[in-house]
Image (cartoon, rainbow, N blue to C red):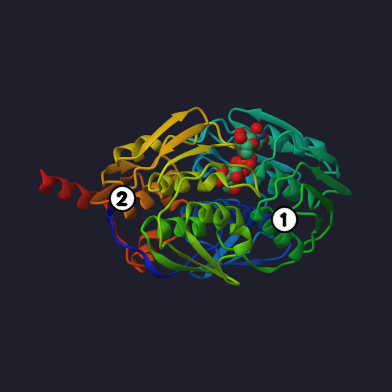
């Protein structure tokens, strides 16, 4: 198992580039199944969730070819397989997008039911509700979700909860259905708009993405397209907080500042300076960080995927902050690890009370999920002393070349593989 070893306390300065958005890419990749011609995706992040998505496409019979490090050509023209088995699906929760894409293209899908998740209960009832509204028969047998439809027809879908995944899956299934689909109470995240833009670039007819009502007129044919994935808003936010937590001054490039507004607003309240440019933001600190309450909500609220990172920043601020998790049942598991680094945080259900101590100290810690891992990296960069982070495979699901990127702005962070890690331990003993 690999680890990150961080010698903390170094101020981050310079320029850092954000990669393509994970949560967009993991939906755009299955979306290629809907296309009758080859497609080219650009600005694809080099992360393990993308490799798994591409691997699933390959196993389904698609041709997948990297043209350069971030550009992939995919041809899903002559495919017959519509089954994603457990072994492939279990490695990436977003494999549920293959349900909507396969159903939309072939009227059949058989995808392993997504398993448990460290963030709490992750039902897919709203996804299935959408597929049923379009005329599909849905069942779960032996751990597999089975969807069949002779002819998908447009329908009215109204979600009981705002769900990113269910909204994207409804779009994927509806683009080739006969007639008009109307999705109400839709999610509005930037990656919803990105998926709509990609599908429209292939000839789909989707209106209203980014609002809570999306209308989709089904089309018979979808042509090839070359499309660039949007920048990753969460990776950008993570770098912004890393810059602030180390008292640094960093220009974060290849971002869409509009997507960062909820993060920018909160960070300014905490006392961080942020200057917005067309496709970059400069983040610097020249005064004390101060307390602030944060509640996570669906877009355009403060993103839940930035909650662990901002909680970490608040441990370094003056005063008491209250962080409320409004999306997931269990998103404070990482707090135990932050406490090992000297944070003073108490958690009651979905609410955390953070007493800013202004200081963290390095410690051996474990990432329990992707964004928890990002929070520990920020903590390690800001802390006095050495932090060793285990289980970094979680982090590599969603951050591309993170150690290399952070080193370029002055961080002392290195990835070491298990043999080296054991050797280091032996030496220390
Ligand atoms: C996506 C993101 C994830 C982010 C989350 C919320 C991807 C690949 N992942 O996850 O990083 O944290 O959005 O922004 O894009 N729910 C139901 N029934 C359903 C579906 C969801 O009750 O059928 C509930 C969930 O339990 C949760 C809430 O709705 O409480 C939001 O979940 P959802 O937006 O669906 O999250 P994901 O799309 O899985």
How far from the left and from the top, in percent, is residue 1?
A: 30, 46
State the CA–CA distance, disc 1 to disc 2: 37 Å
Whichever of callouts 1 and 2 sits on the residue coming sooner in the sequence is: 2
CB under 8 Å between discs 1 and 2: no
Q: Residue furthest right?
A: 179
Residue 213 placement, left or right of 360: right
How far from the left and from the top, in percent, is residue 357?
A: 34, 43
Residue in the picture at 84% in, 57% down: 220
Residue ID for mark 2: 2
Residue 323 placement, left or right of 103: left
Question: Where is ligand 1, by quadrant?
Answer: top right
Q: Is residue 255 above or below residue 345?
A: below
Residue in the picture at 53% in, 52% down: 269
- Badge 2 marks a residue whose secondary structure is loop
Residue ID for mark 1: 34
Residue 182 placement, left or right of 51: right
How many numbered discs, if any? Answer: 2
Q: Is residue 192 above or below residue 136?
A: below
């Amino acid at each position: 198992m690999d680890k990150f070893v961080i010698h903390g306390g170094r101020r981050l300065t310079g320029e850092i580039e954000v990669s393509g958005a994970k949560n967009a890419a993991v939906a755009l990749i299955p979306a290629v199944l809907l296309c009758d011609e080859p497609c080219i995706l650009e600005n694809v992040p080099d992360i393990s969730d993308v490799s798994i998505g591409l691997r699933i496409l390959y196993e389904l019979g698609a041709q997948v070819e990297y043209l350069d490090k971030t550009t992939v050509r995919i041809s899903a023209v002559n495919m017959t397989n519509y089954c994603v088995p457990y072994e492939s699906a279990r490695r990436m929760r977003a494999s549920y997008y293959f349900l909507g894409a396969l159903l939309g293209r072939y009227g059949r899908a058989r995808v392993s039911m997504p398993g448990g998740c460290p963030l709490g209960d992750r039902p897919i009832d709203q996804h299935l509700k959408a597929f049923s509204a379009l005329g599909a028969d849905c069942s779960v047998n032996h751990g597999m979700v089975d969807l069949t439809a002779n002819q998908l027809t447009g329908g009215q879908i109204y979600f009981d909860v705002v769900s990113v995944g269910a909204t994207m899956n409804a779009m994927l299934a509806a683009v080739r259905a006969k007639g008009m689909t109307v999705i109400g109470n839709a999610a509005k995240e930037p990656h919803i708009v990105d998926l709509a833009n990609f599908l429209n670039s292939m000839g789909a007819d989707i209106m209203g993405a980014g609002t809570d009502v999306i209308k989709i007129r089904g089309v018979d044919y979808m042509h090839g397209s070359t499309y660039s994935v949007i920048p990753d808003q969460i990776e950008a936010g993570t770098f912004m907080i890393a810059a602030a937590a180390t008292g640094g001054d960093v220009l974060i490039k290849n971002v869409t500042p509009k997507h960062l507004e909820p993060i920018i607003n909160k960070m300014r309240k905490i006392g961080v300076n942020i200057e917005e440019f067309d496709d970059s933001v400069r983040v610097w600190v020249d005064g004390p960080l101060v307390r602030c309450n944060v509640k996570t909500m669906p877009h355009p609220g403060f993103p839940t995927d930035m909650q662990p990172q901002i909680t970490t920043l608040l441990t370094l601020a003056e005063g008491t902050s209250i962080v409320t998790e409004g999306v997931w049942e269990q998103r404070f598991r990482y707090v135990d690890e932050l406490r090992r680094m000297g944070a003073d945080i108490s958690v009651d259900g979905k609410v955390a009370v953070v007493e800013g101590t202004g200081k963290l100290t390095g410690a051996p810690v474990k990432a329990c999920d992707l964004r928890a891992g990002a929070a520990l990296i920020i903590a390690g960069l800001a802390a006095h002393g050495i932090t060793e982070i285990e289980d970094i495979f979680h982090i590599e699901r969603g951050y591309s070349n993170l150690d290399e990127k952070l080193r370029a702005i002055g961080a002392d962070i290195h990835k070491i593989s298990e043999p080296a890690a054991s050797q280091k331990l032996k030496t220390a003993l």
